[in-house]
Image: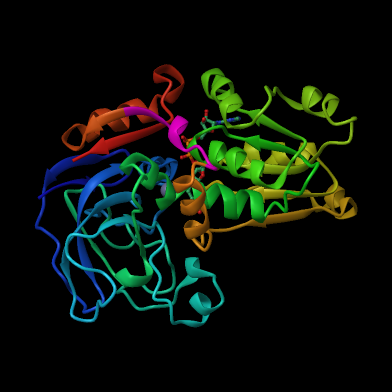
Amino acid sequence: MKALVYHGPGKKSWEDVPDPTILKPTDVIVKIDATTICGTDLHILKGDVPAVEVGRILGHEGVGTITEIGDAVASLVVGDRVIVSAVTACGRCIYCKDGVYSHCQADEGASGIGWILGHLIDGTQAEYVRVPFAETSVHKLPEGVSDAEGLLLSDILPTGHEIGVQYGRVKPGDVVAVIGAGPVGLAAMLTAGLYGPSRIIAIDLDANRVAEATKFGATDGDWKEQVLALTDGLGVDVAIEAVGIPQTFTMCLDIVRPAGTVANVGVHGTGVDLPLDTLWISNIVITMGLINANTTDMLLKMVASKKLDATPFVSHTFALDDILDAYDVFERAAETKALKVVLNA
Ligand code: NAD
Ligand code: ZN
């Protein structure tokens, strides 16, 4: 089959690799019908995620059709159309039982983390993918949900909702600022709307993405003075970081009000100074984490019933074979106006 293979920082190619096979009775093989590219894939290609080894097939988002099932798989059959979650979970370990699927302890040759696809094992930017613990790691695609909408449930909608909005403790009336209006930041803005904030402010260097953010519930935003002016000079209740660089994390600390919350969603490749000498007195909460995918089913229901409109996320569609062009477009989002790029097999 063909797959997008990581060859170290800055290097990738679309090349021939062996087809995946069932390795454990709880596995399935999924023929990818649609996949996409995440900001995290860009961090991997920058060298920010050193756990990714040379030769790894990237990608942790996908919709596809099951072509093979392991002997222990009872609730899925060949031909089922499924959403592959970014988080692979055994459903049985101590963390899974607690709903913290992101830290599933199952031994997949890469134990101790739920995000393994396109990270610690081969991922979804390929014609086929092996999905371990399939029964607890895929979601059947309901009638009426398109492949492109389904793809958003693999990662960005649950990530924005769980790590941005829920960890950020967004509640009715809150003023929420989201720094980084990429697909994940936009997902946080859209799902923040479920909790009744009084205002959502989008902050990005990319003017197109700030303009697009108005479709997801945000009012136009600019930098600090304007944010403070919009919030009676005190700052925002919740500042969500959705970029993954020290500067934007610090920006969140600059605009959060006393007793507010900073929810870090970005994947970081370097550390950041935490100025405890000025922060200790502020009563703020700082949260961070990896998507748990514990709200995927709920969000999928909201998308299926059209209560959440996932359609504005997709800006470009490519054939899977043209994935290198899709990377180029997604990497140059400010020029190409890319949001989520969909690759159809
Ligand atoms: P993206 O690269 O498409 O978007 C990032 C946005 O940040 C861009 O619009 C860019 O213009 C903006 N930006 C860059 N520098 C900025 C600055 N100095 N000030 C303001 N805006 C700036 O990425 P994405 O797919 O939306 O993902 C966003 C982040 O979320 C990434 O770090 C990604 O790795 C992370 N992520 C985390 C999880 C998790 O589980 N925690 C899951 C998925 C993605
Ligand atoms: Zn992702």
Residue 111 placement: quadrant: bottom left
Instruction: Indicate the position of residue 223 as horizontal and vertical percent values.
Output: 72, 24
* 251 sits to left or right of 313: right
- Residues rendered magenta in the picture: 307-316
Residue for point 70% across, 22% down: 222
Residue 229 placement: quadrant: top right
Frontmost residue, 251 versus 238:
238
Instruction: Indicate the position of residue 289 as horizontal and vertical percent values.
Output: 57, 58
Quadrant where the image shows the C terminus: top left
* 287 sits to left or right of 307: right
Q: How many marks?
A: 0
* 148 sits to left or right of 231: left
- Residue 136 position (above or below residue 36): below
- Residue 342 position (above or below residue 150): above
Instruction: Indicate the position of residue 97 as horizontal and vertical percent values.
Output: 52, 79
Residue for point 18% across, 60% down: 79
* Residue 315 is covered by the magenta coloring: yes
Frontmost residue, 12 versus 256:
256
Frontmost residue, 168 versus 224:
168
Whether residue 141 appears in this view of the structure is yes
Instruction: Indicate the position of residue 273 as horizontal and vertical percent values.
Output: 69, 48
- Residue 106 position (above or below residue 213): below
* Residue 166 is covered by the magenta coloring: no
- Residue 269 position (above or below residue 340): below
Whether residue 48 appears in this view of the structure is no
Q: How is the image coloured?
A: rainbow
Frontmost residue, 290 versus 343:
343
Residue for point 74% across, 40% down: 197
